[in-house]
Image (tube, helix red, strand yellow):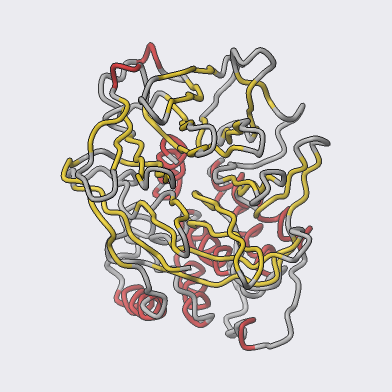
Amino acid sequence: MRVWTRTVLLALSAAACAHPDTSARPSPHDDPRPRVENAAARSTDARDGWARFLGHDYAGSARSYERAFGANSGDDVSLYLTALASLRAGDTPAAMTWLTRLADLGSDLVPTDAQFHDLAPNPEFRTLTARIAANSAHHRRSAESFRTAEKGLMVEGIAYDPVEGAFYLGSVRRRKIVKVPRGRPPADFVTPRAGLDAVGGIRVDAGRRRLWAVSSADARQDGFTEAVGGRNALVEIDLGTGALLGSYPLSEAGEHVLNDVAVDADGRPFATDTRSGQIYTLAQGRRSLAPLFDTPPFLYPNGLTFDDEGKVLFVGDASGVHRVDVKTRNVTRLAQAQGIPLVFIDGLYFVRSQTGPRLVGIQVVAGPGRVLTATLSPALDAITRVEILESNHPSFDAPTTGAIVGGAMFMIANSQQWVPREPSETIVLKTPL
């Protein structure tokens, strides 16, 4: 999430919807018959809304997100962002109207003071915030699993090795990877001496005894200088020794931010580039990274994961979750039932259980963060239902990624990356699936 998150949060804190219909719409969960969103319309309008928001065209962003909501009447993320864009456009009455709609929908997306700072003193805003916070309290199932004693790590990535029963935590600030063995205290596994920059997403390839990690220069990392700005690489680490086996740089021109990583059945890593919208993998000869697509197909991609066979790649971006056929380079946005949209997913994971295939994702950008689970069709080509597993947890302070272990996800609750603050311990929550 790293540089991507800082850019996004600055933007979020930085004839649109002037007279919206204020009548409350029923929640799609009240209707037992699943209804499918207008996928093409919602995807187009959501992409346009986010692009306009980042371009500071807030009135245009509000209009686009209003249309996105029209394509999915349970889309509380679009409601939230319509309100925020309206406020940034200087239309406070419209912002309050849309926040009222958000509360009436029964959403759990609590408007944050950092994003809605101009409304923070408004008593009506405080009342609406309390209503939505009460909704979020119904989605509380996580408990603290462990925490690090070292403060200020800014942990972005977490991974789990089932062979040793150990967790690995990637630090943005300290430029290192910490190992948390079962029953023993955390210890540095890869130190800054290995030449890492800020560590982003990490994944374990247990069978090949490899740990893959994103390493990208970040202004918040120890020892940062402008000379290293823009440096991005994917690194390969020996799980047995912590030795750096390879560093594969991204050398293409332009602005890039490598973010998260997933590994296919053959042990080949793939990484999202949030800034360019591209996916990168190892080039022939394994000396550097190569783009997967001729033209980047995504808008702010972040979380990605393979299915349990390591063949089907899922990528989350600002408009939804996409299924990627790596061999043909075909990309298809997953259609979903009306309701909570699977957008702005940071950590993304595939789970196959007795109830069928699912995706689990940590949703960011709108509100303090929440954990969602999305039931997939048997063919893995559509989302049939989205449910909230966790929302607005008291430990949340920029939640990022997770690791699936058995029937639970262990997630970074407080990466502490969204706004400057006093450094604290890193908290890992356990969320039953």
The residue depicted at 66 percent of the width and 12 percent of the height is 285
Q: How many marks?
A: 0
Relative to residue 328, is residue 230 depicted above or below? above
Report if residue 48 is visible in the image: no
The residue depicted at 36 percent of the width and 77 percent of the height is 137
Report if residue 109 is visible in the image: yes
Would residue 264 be found to the left or right of residue 155 on screen?
Answer: right
Quarter residue 55 falls in: top right
Which one is in front, 347 or 67?
347
Q: Position of residue 387 (x, y in %)?
A: 55, 72
Would residue 139 be found to the left or right of residue 146 on screen?
Answer: right
Quarter residue 410 falls in: bottom left
Q: Position of residue 414 (x, y in %)?
A: 30, 52
The residue depicted at 63 percent of the width and 22 percent of the height is 282
Quarter residue 254 falls in: top right
Q: Position of residue 103 (x, y in %)?
A: 47, 79
Relative to residue 187, is residue 68 depicted above or below? below
Relative to residue 371, is residue 211 depicted above or below? above
Which one is in front, 9 or 174?
174
Q: Position of residue 152 (x, y in %)?
A: 21, 40
The residue depicted at 71 percent of the width and 44 percent of the height is 311
Would residue 35 be found to the left or right of residue 203 on screen?
Answer: right
Would residue 107 be found to the left or right of residue 392 on screen?
Answer: right
Which one is in front, 273 or 74?
273
Position of the N terminus, as image quadrant, is top left
Relative to residue 58, is residue 193 depicted above or below? above
Which one is in front, 393 or 247?
247
